[in-house]
Image (cartoon, grey):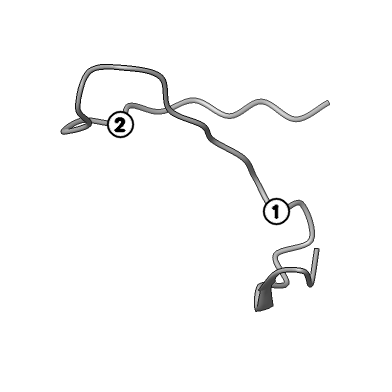
């Protein structure tokens, strides 16, 4: 299992998205994953 904890500050109120690239390859943006 993977557990991620943290705090993100400074966002405007409202809905926001968040995702993690499991393999860490972002050489071609999200297409690489």
Q: Secondary structure at mark 1?
A: loop
Q: Secondary structure at mark 2?
A: loop
Q: Is residue 17 above or below residue 31?
A: above
Question: Disc 1 versus disc 2: distance between alpha carbons?
Answer: 18 Å
The quarter of the displayed image where residue 16 is located: top left
**Callout 1 touching callout 2 (CB < 8 Å):** no
Q: Is residue 19 above or below residue 24?
A: above
Q: Is residue 4 above or below residue 22?
A: above
Can you say which quadrant of the picture contains the C terminus? bottom right
For label 1, count other residues whose C-alpha is less than 10 Å away and answer few (under 14), some (14-19) or many (20+): few
Residue at mark 1: 21
In the image, residue 23 lies at what x, y percent?
79, 61
In the picture as drawn, the residue positioned furthest to the top comes out as 14
Residue at 19% over, 27% down: 12
Task: Say which label, 1 or 2, has the lower sequence index.
Answer: 2
In the image, residue 10 lies at what x, y percent?
16, 33
23 left or right, relative to 24: right
Residue at 73% over, 72% down: 25
In the image, residue 28 lies at what x, y percent?
69, 80
For label 2, count other residues whose C-alpha is less than 10 Å away and answer few (under 14), some (14-19) or many (20+): few
Residue at mark 2: 8
Can you say which quadrant of the picture contains the N terminus? top right
10 left or right, relative to 26: left
């Amino acid at each position: 299992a993977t557990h991620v904890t943290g705090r993100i500050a400074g966002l405007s109120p409202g809905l926001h998205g968040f995702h993690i690239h499991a393999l860490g390859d972002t050489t071609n943006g999200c297409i690489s994953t």
